[in-house]
Image (spheres, rainbow, N blue to C red):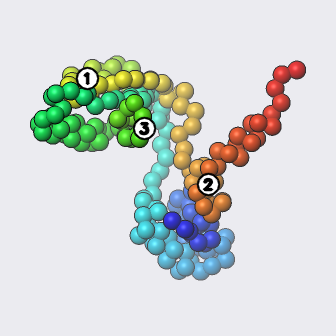
Amino acid sequence: MELTKNEREILKLMLDNCRISDTAVAKKLMISPQAVGKIRKGLEKKGVIRGYSCELDFEAMGITTFALICAKIVAGKEMQSGEAWKKKAAAENALMSAPNLIMFAEPIGSEYNYVVLFGFSNQKEMEDFVQKARMVYAGILEDRRIDTFSARSLRKFDKAQLFRAMLERGSPQNPLMQSLDKVSRIKFGK
């Protein structure tokens, strides 16, 4: 989707503060508050802005343990039947509605069918969940890899920087390239 200059500028300001008023944006961009409101509403209607939220700290909210689970659909005779596929669909729906689900992805060209990220209040809660999930999804899904980590080891969990880099350029380019260029210029050794 191609964004106008004003749309990009408004989005950049909103990434810094999603509660910024149309009047404050208008002053910074030197356009009318009505124009800002119209642009913002247009971005909402297009689905560029999906909502407004506050950012909470995982640890402060009691989420201390994460599990990144890579799962594969069990291939076999039991998956040939329509009932098994119904159970698979029900399993996906149950996963999607789990309150501790943070991310659910279906990678393409991977050995895994699903990659999911869950947050838990502690290690025991995570282990109990994994054990129960193994029973519920037996014969349908199997976890092939589980990586766990604490909230303290979560170094970055922010998509705003990616969006800001894309807005700066005006088109979706890989913002990582500039970072890699900086790293490649660092002299190591001696």
The residue tagged 2 is 173
Q: Which mark sits nearer the N-terminus, 3 or 1?
A: 3
Q: Which mark sits nearer the N-terminus, 2 or 1?
A: 1
The residue tagged 1 is 134
| Image position, residue 188 (x, y; %) | 81, 26
| Image position, residue 183 (x, y; %) | 74, 36
Q: Amino acid at mark 3?
A: Gly
Toward the right, the furthest residue is 190
Element assignment for label 3:
loop
Q: Is residue 87 left or right of residue 160?
A: left
Q: Amino acid at mark 2?
A: Gln
Mark 3–mark 2 Cα distance, whole angstroms, equals 22 Å
Vertical order, 124 against 180 (above or below): above
Task: Give residue 85's quadrant in the image.
Answer: top left
Mark 2–mark 1 Cα distance, whole angstroms, equals 40 Å
Of 100 and 76, which appears nearest the observer?
A: 76
Q: Is residue 58 left or right of residue 29?
A: left
The residue tagged 3 is 109
Say which of marks 3 and 2 sits in front.
3
Say which of marks 3 and 1 sits in front.
3
